[in-house]
Amino acid sequence: DTAVSQTPKYLVTQMGNDKSIKCEQNLGHDTMYWYKQDSKKFLKIMFSYNNKELIINETVPNRFSPKSPDKAHLNLHINSLELGDSAVYFCASSQDRRDRGGYTFGSGTRLTVV
Amino acid sequence: GNSVTQMEGPVTLSEEAFLTINCTYTATGYPSLFWYVQYPGEGLQLLLKATKADDKGSNKGFEATYRKETTSFHLEKGSVQVSDSAVYFCALGGSTSGTYKYIFGTGTRLKVLA
């Protein structure tokens, strides 16, 4: 049983389209995250939700909108996709917002904008 | 603000060689420190962690010691295997402007040759 699962694994789409990525965790964790990993493997946090409340919102274009319907799910919707949005997007979860035990990551969604 | 600096790769070693990947940090307070590993096409996996000064984290033959005096958390392994080939990320968990978050280093690619 996958602890943090993301769908889809691969997403190829044209510029200007709108797309969503979904994430679900079955660990009973309170806090979930979205990270973006660029082609050089650099990881940058985008958003974090704690029990459905947005707690981290880094400087991300407002074309990106997260949504957490419940604490086990965190989705990411992207409007008007641009070439520069091409990256691997990782979902992660932790016990709570100050968890010193480490994150559990999903396997990633590779987004390619053409 | 908090930051993590790790050595640039790639690091190429022969099987059974000794591995060191350097990681230093800047932080206020008492951060937790982590090493994550990312195998090709996969998400990040927690390799080891340390939550206070002088703690040693260890797992799968890898180890790292939290050294507050030198603000370092270097990753070591006595004898690497081909299966250790991956990207390794040093990370820090701590508070920045009242928000607890993890910051990742830029990653170091390790290639082990048979």
Image (cartoon, grey):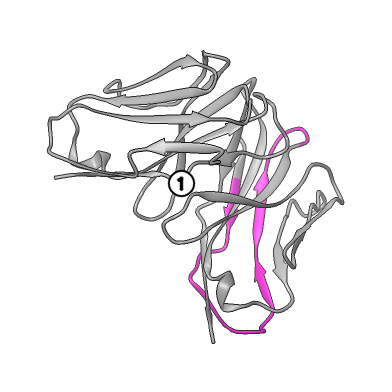
Q: Quadrant of residue A99?
A: top right
Question: Residue A70 appears at what percent x and percent y?
Answer: 50, 15
The magenta span reads B4-30
Seen at 79% across and 52% down, the residue is B66
**In the visual, does A58 lie left or right of B58?**
left
Seen at 58% across and 57% down, the residue is B6
SS under mark 1: loop
Q: Residues within 10 Å of mark 1 (few under 14, many from 20)?
A: many
Q: Is residue B14 magenta?
A: yes
Seen at 67% across and 40% down, the residue is A102
Question: Pointer 1: what residue?
Answer: A107
Question: Residue A23 appears at what percent x and percent y?
Answer: 44, 31
Question: Residue A89 appears at what percent x and percent y?
Answer: 39, 40
Q: Quadrant of the C terminus of chain B?
A: bottom right
Subunit that carries the residue with mark 1: A
Question: Residue A15 appears at what percent x and percent y?
Answer: 13, 36
Q: Quadrant of the N terminus of chain B?
A: top right
- Above or below, A99 relative to B89: above
Front residue (pair A38, A66): A66
Q: Is residue B61 magenta?
A: no
Front residue (pair B2, A43): A43
Tally of numbered tags:
1
The residue sitting at the right extreme is: B54
Mark 1: which amino acid?
Ser
Q: Quadrant of residue A36?
A: top left
- Above or below, A25 relative to B37: above
